[in-house]
Amino acid sequence: KACKAKEETLNSLLSGLFLMATRDVIGDLAEPTSLLMSSAANVRPKLQGNFAKEVGYYATGFESRYTLAPEVSVWQLARQVSNTVKSKFTSDNIALGIFLKRFVLLYKKRPQDLLSAIARFNKTNIHLTNLGRLFMQTDYGNLKVKRLLALPSVQFMSKPVVCLETHTFNGSLQLTFSYPSPVTDPAFVQQLINRFDRLLHEVASGRETQPRAQEQEGKHHVPAKL
């Protein structure tokens, strides 16, 4: 209801909450905080033709940097995310990503070199991934598989990062947080989840979220370290 009233998507709101929660935990609440966030979206609706039999899921990702002022609201962040996605999540960018990947596979013996060169000149940071189609047994005696969750692997990354993945099932929203351990401090992740949960409940209850600096006025805040 809140998203409908504000004319924002649920994904934009969750991204805004994620940014604000991260800023509240690690940022200097008296100064603007700069954060880098990668977003991913399903591109199948934008592809021409029926790919249902060929591929289970196409995902495109892009990185964006956001500067959060101390007084910024969740809904202002949601609007920033929405505008960023609209500008980068275009059919032209997706088509270019598909073409470049096909070109790499067909004509380059060392595709990683070409991918690195492309990345240096690619201003939109589009990353196209095909998760493929999964075929597996669904019946196991009295047990039956109803759905599969494709969880991203972040263990290969050598830098601290937290991934938030959203799923909807039977009208319910499921949020999954994942992170590489021990590169990312589990204590930080717990602080982030707690803050995210509080902000989410404030929005769901119709209350306007307050900047953390106003909440903790007169208190000493020690930023957590990633």
Image: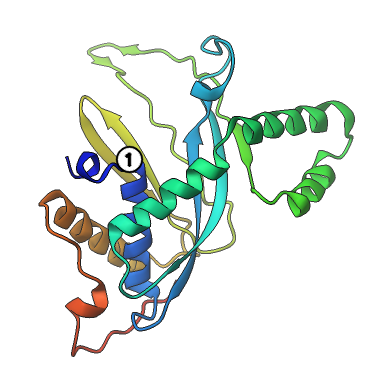
- 173 is higher (above) or lower (below) than 44: below
Does 142 sit left or right of 145 as displayed?
left
Quarter containing the C terminus: bottom left
From the top left corner, tell me how far across and down residue 133 is, in percent: 53, 19
Question: Mark 1 Cα within 10 Å, few/some/many (few <14, many 20+)?
Answer: some
Residue at x 48%, y 36% (from the top left corner): 41
Rendered image quadrant of residue 137: top left
- 122 is higher (above) or lower (below) than 193: above
Q: How many callouts does the rendering have? A: 1
Rendered image quadrant of residue 209: bottom left
Q: How is the image coloured?
A: rainbow
Of the pair 113 and 201, the residue shown nearer to us = 201
The residue pinned by badge 1 equals 9
Rendered image quadrant of residue 115: top right
Does 194 sit left or right of 222 as displayed?
left
Quarter containing the N terminus: top left
Q: Does the rendering let one see residue 39?
A: no
From the top left corner, tell me how far across and down residue 145 is, in percent: 31, 18
From the top left corner, tell me how far across and down residue 120 is, in percent: 77, 54
Mark 1 lies on a secondary structure that is loop
Of the pair 124 and 128, the residue shown nearer to us = 124
Does 61 sit left or right of 5 as displayed?
right
Residue at x 37%, y 65% (from the top left corner): 22
From the top left corner, tell me how far across and down residue 23 is, in percent: 37, 69
- 203 is higher (above) or lower (below) than 56: below
Q: Does the rendering let one see residue 105?
A: yes
Residue at x 56%, y 52% (from the top left corner): 63
- 22 is higher (above) or lower (below) than 104: below
Of the pair 139 and 110, the residue shown nearer to us = 110
User: What amino acid type is highlighted by mark number 1?
Assistant: Thr
